[in-house]
Amino acid sequence: MINENNNSENLNKFLHKENEIRNVETPDGSIIQVDPLNDYFCTDRPEVKEPKNKVIEKFLNWARAESLWVLGFGTGCGSIEIPPLVTPRFDAYRFGVQMRPTPRQSNVFIISGYLAVKTLKRVIRTYEQMQGPKYVLALGSCTINGGMYWDSYNTINRLDHYIPVDVYVAGCMPRPEALLAGFNKLKERIKDGRAEGANEYAEKFDWYKSNQKKIVKDWNMPDYNW
Amino acid sequence: MAIRDILTPFTAWKKVFREPVTVKDPLNDRPGAERYRGFHKNDLTACIGCGSCEAICENEAIDLVPVEGIETKSGDSGLRPLVDYGRCCWCALCVDVCTTGSLNLTNEYTWVTEDPEDFRFIPGAENKPWDKLEAGWKKPEPNYEFYSLKREAMEELHPGDRDKSFIEIVKGYSKEQAEAEADRCVECGICIATCPANMGIPEYIKAVRNDDIEEGFKILYETNPLPEICGRICTHKCETVCSVGHRGEPLSIRWLKRYIADQVESSEYKRILGTDGIENNGKKVAVIGSGPAGLSAAHYLSLMGYKITIYEQYAHAGGMMRYGIPEYRLPYDQIDKDVNYILSLGVDIHYNTQIGKDISLADLKEKYDAVFAGTGLHLGRSTRIPGTEHENVYQAIDLLNKITDGKEIHVAEKIVVIGGGNVAMDITRSLTRLQNQKYGKVQMIATALESEKSLPADVEEVVEAREEMAIVNPGWGPKSIEIKDGKITGLHVVKCLSIFDEEGRFNPQFDENNTNFFEADMIVESIGQGMDISYISGDIKDSLKFDPRGRVTVNEYFQSDAPWLFIGGDIIQGPDVIHGIANGHKAAYGIDNFLNQNK
Amino acid sequence: MKEQKNIFNWQPDRSKYPKVKENGELDIDLTSEKFIKLWQGPNHPGVTGNMAIELTVSGDEVVHAKTHVGYLHRGFEKLMERRLWIQCFPTCIRMCVAEPDYNEYLLAKSAEELSGIEVPEMAEWLRTLVLEMARLQSLLRTVPGQAGTLSLGVGVQWGVYLRDLVLDLFEELTGGRVYHMYILPGGVRGLLPDGFKKRMEDVLKKIEEFIVNIENLMFKNIVFKKRTIGVGYIDPAWVDQFGIVGPNARAAGFKRDVRKDYPYLKYNELDFDVTYETDSDIFARSVVRKKELILTLDLIRQIMAKMPEKGDFKAQTPNVLHWKIPAGETYVRSESSRGEYGFYTVSDGSTMPRRINLRGPSYTHAVSLLEKMLINANLADVHSIMVSLQTCPPEIER
Amino acid sequence: MENYIEDIKLRFDVKDIVSRRDNLSFITCEKEKTIALITHMKNNLGFTHFVLLTAVDWIEDGLFQLTYILNNPNAKIDIAVRTMISRENSEMESAHKLWQQVATYQRELREMFGINFPDSPGVTDNFILEGWDDIPPYRRDFDTKKYAEETYFPRPGRETNDPAEYMKKKLS
Amino acid sequence: MDIVIRLLYVFLGLFIVLNWGLLMSAIMRKIGARVAGRYGIPYYQPWIDLIKLYSLRDSITHGVMFYLGPVFRVSGGVGIFLFMPLIFGSSYFSNFSFAGDLVLIMYFQFFGMLGMALGAGEGGHPYSAIGISRGLSQFTTIEVPMTLAVISIAVQYHTLSISEIVAAQQGGIMNWTLFTNPFATAAAMLSLLGAFGHSPFNLVKAPNEIPIGPPTEYHSAFLGVLRTNAAILHVIEAVLFMNLFFGGAGNWFELIIKSFFIYFWSVFVGVVFPRFRIEQSVQWFLKIPLLFGVIAIIIFM
C-alpha cells in the first residue's frame, strides 16, 4: 500500500492540470469539489499485493509462467497473427499459452499494435478487470514509439504511459515466431519474479490515471457490461 | 439425405491418424525467406550518410547521427542512419532508395526486450546478431530504381563539326531535359560542403524542377556571381561526390546551373535579384584583377554598399577565364553577360592598368579603404629540360592569351604538348583547331607525367580532345628536346613509374629503359602556372608573411598581415574558378568586417 | 423469407415483430425495462475484429442493433494527406489487414492513371497473381470461419494452416508475411523466385484436398445447415438500397463481379465465370465463398500458365522523393474477397495527395445493412450473420 | 456514356465535365440541384448502385467539394457528381432517402469534416471519434502531427542532423 | 467397515478420479487438437492451470452468492461422487452407495447447476445470466430423456441401486444394458452429449457469442474450484453411465478405459459438429432422445 504522503506527492508530481482537484460552481450556485481522478471512475484503487515468501513464490511463478492465459482481444492489426499462433502451424498451446475469452480469466494481455483512443479506454478497463498478477505483451512498433501512426491524432505513441508493459516484441507486425519468443521472454521474466506489472500499476496508479485521463476525454461508459 | 449429413462430418476424424503439421521448433527452424524484410544492416564503409533513407521514411524512423570512427569528409557526411524500431514498419523503401546500396535488410525478425528504449540502434555500428546474415531484402534488380541513374544526355556538336571552329561545343539543356535531370536529385546536400562556394545546389536544382527559374537564379547569386561562367567551366567537384553517382551517373549539376543562367536575359538580372538602388555607404575598395576572385569580391562588396574600383591589366575583364579558357568552352559573350551585370552595380573598372607599373600598391592603399588582390597565375612554368630555350617552345598560357586577343600565333605541323591538366587540354584542343584550319589535318600529341587514370584534367576534356583527333599519350616524363639544325624535331620522353614518393612529395621515378620519341616541330609546355606578385614590394612586402611555396599567408577571411590588404583566388588556393569565387565572397565579408571595425 | 420444406425448419417466422411505425422506426420503447442491452465487442471473441454492436434484446431475440466503430481509427486519409505519394504505400496497406494488397494495387493504379504511367506486361501479371493470392489467403480464413463462428473450430484450424502456407509463398515473393509492400507505382518489386511455380502448385494441391475436407465437414453437416439455411436472409431488393457488393450480392443472385464487369489487370485474358447463388442466406453466402475459393485456385493456375517467364517488372517513375502527380481525380475499383473495393483519389498537383478516400465493402455491410439484418435475429445468430457479411472494421473507419 | 451525359446536360446545368476513362466521368453541379440530379440519375438513368460519398477540403478557395459517385450496374459506367459548398456553416441536403447507406456516409462527414446534413438519421451520433473536442480532424487546417506531439508523449531522445548543415559545420 | 477407513478410501478414490479427470481432459484436448493437425497442450497442463488459478493474488468478488456458486457446484459434483460405486465388487471403492442412490445422483446433477445459476447471477454480467437461462433450459430438457432412460432401467432391473444394476449386468458383455435395453442406452447416451457440454450442445458457454457463459465473471480460485469440479464431474458422469449401461468396472483399469470411451463419445461428436441454438437443442432433445426414452419405457412396461 502507498501511504498518504506518498500519494499526494505522486499526485503533485505527475498531475496534469486538467486533473487537479478543483472547486466547481454548480448551476444552482453551490460550490462542490471535483476530483477528476476519482470522480468519473467506478472501481476501487488497485492495491499492491506483496509476493509470498521466496520459495513458494518461485514455485508459483513457475506455474504462472507455464500457464499463460491470453485474453482474446485483438486491439490492432497484430491480432491477425494470433490465429496462426494458436492453430496447427505454431500451436502455442504446446507452450502453455491458451486463449481465454474473458478478461476475468486471463493473465496476459496482448496489445497487438496501435491503440486508438477509443480502444485505449476499453483496454484500460479490460486491464483493470484482469486478475493479478497480470502481464502485458506489447506487439510492434506502434506500442513502442507510435510506429506507423506516430503522427495520427487518434492513436497513442507510448503504451507504457498508460499501462505497465512487460515485454515488447519488435516488428510491424511481429511474426508468430517473434511472438513465441516474446512469450519465452515473458516466462523468463515471470520466473525471475520481475513481472510485477500489476503492482507497478497500483503503485503508480495516479500517474497512470493522470496520463490516461489526459487523452481519454470521455470517460462515460455504459453502465451495463463493458 | 439427412443421414448423410449426419455421417459425413465424421470423416474429419481420419486426420487424427496423421502426423501434426506443427513446426517443431518454430524459433529456430524457420529463418525468414530469402527476400524477407527483417532487421536492418548497413555497410558503414560504403554508406555516405546522404540521408535519402531518412527522407523517404514515412515514419521518421531514421535519424542521422555521428558515429565514432567515421570522419566527415568531402563526399561523406560522417553521419550514419540510426533506426528507431519504435517507428519502423519494415517497408524497405529505405533500402530501395539507398544511393550507395549499403543499407539492406536481413531475414532476422526476432527481437524481444523488456526495455522499450533498446529499440534504437545504428545498423552496422552496434554488433547485432544479424549483421553477418546474407539473406534478406536487397534492392530488386534489374531496372528497378526510384530515380533515374542515367544522365540526361547533353547535346554537343559532333566532333567533325567542331574541330575547326571555336563555336561553343555544349548546347545546353532544353526545359524538358533540365527538368528531367533535376528530377534525379535526391536532395541530400552532400555536394554543398564539397563546393568551395557552398552553393545551395539542391535548392537551385529544386527550382529547376519546379520550373521556377527566378528563384533558382536568386539562389545562384547568393553564393556565386558568375553563374554563366561557372555553369560552363566549373570543375564541378560537387558532381564527383554526388550521392546518385555511387550507383549511377552523378547529376549534371554544372549544366543545370548553366540552364538557369541561360534562361535569364541580362536585362532581367536587376529585377530578379532586386539590386536596384543599393545605398552607397561611402567607403571605397580597390580590387586588383578582374578574375573570378576579384569579380566575386567586387560583386558582394558592392551589394554591401561599397564603392568598388577594379584594376585590370588586360583590355577585357575576366582574367584567366577569358585569357586562359578557349572560346569553344566559354564564349566571351557569356563572360561579358556576367561581368556586365557586376559592372552595372556601380563598379568602376580600369582596363590596361597594371599594378606596380601603372599605379603602385601603395597608391591604392592611400586612395582606398581596403584592397583586394586576386591577380591570379599568369606566368607559365617551364620543365627546364634541355632545349626549352628554343623559340618554338612555348608556354601554353601565353599562347592562349594571344588566341584570346586574336593575335596571330605560330602553329606548326607537328606539335607536342607537355602537361595533363585542363590548361594542357585547352591548348591542345585550341591548337588542333588551328592546325585543322591551317593544314586541314591534326598532328598533335599531348603527353603528361601522370598515368591515364590519374590525369588531372577532366575526363570529358580528354575524351573530347581524342575525338578531335589529338593523341593523348600520358605516362611519360619529358627528357630532352631534340634540336637539329636549329629546328625542333621532337621530344624524348621516358616512362614515368610514379610521381609522388611515399611521403606524398613530388618525386617522380622513371624507367630509364623505356623511352619514346615524339616527333614535333613545336613544343608547348603546360605543366602549371606561377604567380607574379612583384607588385607587392617594399614596406608592404616586409609586413607580410609567406609560406614555403612563396604564397602570402592569410587568415580565413583572406586578410593578410597588412590588415587593409586582402588576397585571394588562384594565388592562394591554386587554379580553380569556383575557389576564386568562394575566396572573393569570403574576402568580401572579411573586408566588410574590417571596415566596420574601424568605424 | 424463404420457406424451408424439410423437417428441420425450426426458424420461426418473427418478421412481423417488432412492429414498424410508418416512418420506418421500430414501434418499441427501448427505455421500458422489458429489454436488455447487450454489447458485443470490442472485447469479445465473436466479433470480426475490433468493433462493437450494441444490441437490444427481448429474450433471445434482437429488437434493435447499432454498430459502433472507431476502435481502429487511425486517420489514414488524414495521414496520407501529409505524406509523399511513395510514402502513402506503406501507410495505405495497413487499412485492411486481411487483404492489404488491394490497397497497394488501387493506390498504385490511381497514381498511374493520374500521371499516365504505363505498367510493363510482366508487372501486370504479377499484380494479378498477388491479388488472387490475397483473395486465396483471405478465403482460407473466411470459408471455414463461417463454421468457426458456430464453434466448429477444426475447419478453421485447417484453413489457417493453409493460409499460413500461402503466406509463406507471399513471403518468398514479396518479402513480407502479412503486409507485402509489393506493388508500387510503375510496377512491382521483384520477379518470381526460382522454383516458385512448383511450390505454388504444391500448396494449391493441399488446398484442393482441404476443399474436399471442408465440403464434408461444413457443407454436408446437418447442424451447420440448420444453423445457416434461412438465417441472415438478404432480400435481393436490398442490394442496391444498401449498397451490397461482392459475395453478399452474388449470393442474392446478382452476378456482379468487378473482375468481370470492369476488367482490370489481366482479368480479361483469364477464363472464368461469376459464381453466384440465389438463396441469399448464410449458407448461400458460404457456398459462394467456397466456389470463389475453387475459382481462385483455377485463376492462379491460369495465371501461372500464361505468365511470361521474364521481363521488366517496373517502369521508371519520376524520382519518388519529389514526385508530383498532375492535378485530377479518379476512382478505381477492384474485387476484393469482400466485394467492390475502391479508392477515390484527388491530386492537387503537389507531391502529396489531396485526398484519398477508401470505399470498403464493409462500410455499407457492417453498418446500415447489419443493423437492418439483426432485427428479429436470434441472439445466437448475431455473430454468424456478422461473419457471413465478412465485415472488416478497419475499412469502415480507416 | 455520352448519352447519359447528354441527357443530364439537357435537364441540369452541369459544368466541368471531365472524362477520366471510358466508364468514368466527373461532372459538377450546383449545390441546390445536386440531390435532384442524383435522384434523376437513380430513377431514370439506371444509376442504382451508390458507390461513395465523400468530401474534399479546398481550404484555399474556402470550399468543400462533395463527391457522389454513382454506378450503373447494367451499363457498367460510373458518373461522379461533384458539388461545391461553402466551408463556413457547411450544410448539404441529405440523400439518405435514396439509399439508406448514405446516412452512414453523412454521419462520417459530419464528424470528420463538420458538414451538416439536417434530417439525416442519427447524423449527430458519434461515429468514429469519442469525446473529440478539437476542430473536425479531416479539415485541412487541423494539424495532426502537432496534435499528436502535444498529446501522446512521443518517446524523447531522438535527434537528427541534416547532412548538408552538419558537413558545412564540420568541414568549414 | 470403520467410517474413518471408509472416508480414507473415499478420499483416495476422489484423488484418483480428480487426477484421472484432469489427465482425461488433457488427452481429449490433445485428441481434438490432433484432428485439427496440431499437438495441443502438454499432458500436465491442467495441473499447472489449477495451481496457477489457486495462486492468483487478486480475486475480486461480487457478493456472498458469488462465493457460494462454486461451492454449490462442487457439492453437486462431490455429492454424485460420494454416492457412486466406483469399482464393482470392491467394498473400498463403492463409496456411500445405497439402495436408492440413483435418485440422489439424479438430484445432485441438478443441484450443481442450480448453485452455479445462483452464483453466476450474482456476478452481474448479462452474459452469465444469458448463459444460465440457456443452461437451465437445456439441462431441463436433457434430464427428460435421461430420466426416461433411468426409469426404463429401474423398471428393467427392478431396483434403484446402482450397485445392483451393475451386478445385474455381470456375466458377459451381452448382459450389459447396452444390449439388453438399447433404446434406453441410446436415449441416455444422446442426452449425455448435452451433459458434457460439447458441441452441438454447448451454446451455454459458447465462447464465441457470450464469452463463456455462466463462468464469465469467475476467475482465480473460483474458477479453480469450478475446474476441479469439472474434472471430477466428467469422470463421475462417465462412471455413472458406465455403471448403468456398460456393465460397470471390476477394477480401476476397466473404469479408466470405459470412462475414457464414454467421455470420448461426446468429444467424438463435438469435434465435427457446430453448435445448435438453444431452442434447436431443446427441440432436438425433446424429439429423438425422448422418442428413444419413451420406446425404452414402453418396451419394459
Image: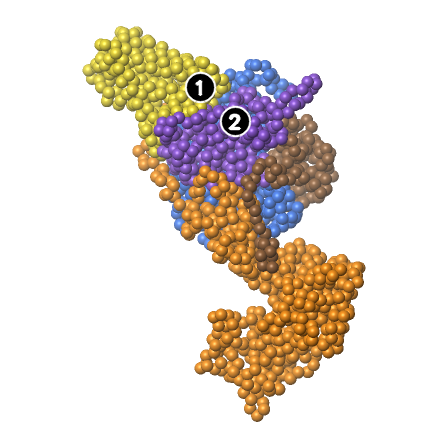
Chain colours: A purple, B orange, C blue, D brown, E yellow
Residue B585 is situated, as x and y percent measured from the top left of the image, at 68, 63
Residue B282 is situated, as x and y percent measured from the top left of the image, at 79, 63
Asked if badges 2 and 1 are on one and the same chain, I answer no
Q: On the rendered structure, is D12 left or right of A84?
A: right
Residue B305 is situated, as x and y percent measured from the top left of the image, at 76, 61
Q: Circle 1 — which element?
A: helix
User: Closest to the observer: E103 or B57?
Assistant: B57
**C-alpha gap between disc 2 and disc 1:** 21 Å
> On the image, numbered disc 2 is attached to which residue?
A125
- Please tell me whether residue B204 is drawn above or below residue B323 in the rendered image: above
Q: Few, some or many C-alpha atoms within 10 Å of disc 2 (few <14, some 14-19, many ≥20)?
A: some
Q: Chain of mark 2?
A: A
The amino acid type found where label 2 is placed reads: Arg
Which label belongs to residue A22?
Answer: none
Q: Chain of mark 1?
A: E
User: Closest to the observer: C386 or B9?
Assistant: C386
Q: How many marks?
A: 2
> On the image, numbered disc 1 is attached to which residue?
E214
The amino acid type found where label 1 is placed reads: Pro
Residue at x 39% of width, y 15% of height: E71
Residue at x 74% of width, y 75% of height: B360
User: Closest to the observer: A155 or A88?
Assistant: A155
Tell me if residue C273 can be seen: no
Q: Circle 2 — which element?
A: helix
- Mark 2 or 1: in front is 2
Residue at x 71% of width, y 71% of height: B288
Q: Few, some or many C-alpha atoms within 10 Å of disc 1 (few <14, some 14-19, many ≥20)?
A: many
Q: Residue furthest left?
A: E171
Tell me if residue A160 can be seen: yes
Residue at x 23% of width, y 14% of height: E92
- Please tell me whether residue B300 is drawn above or below residue C44 in the rendered image: below
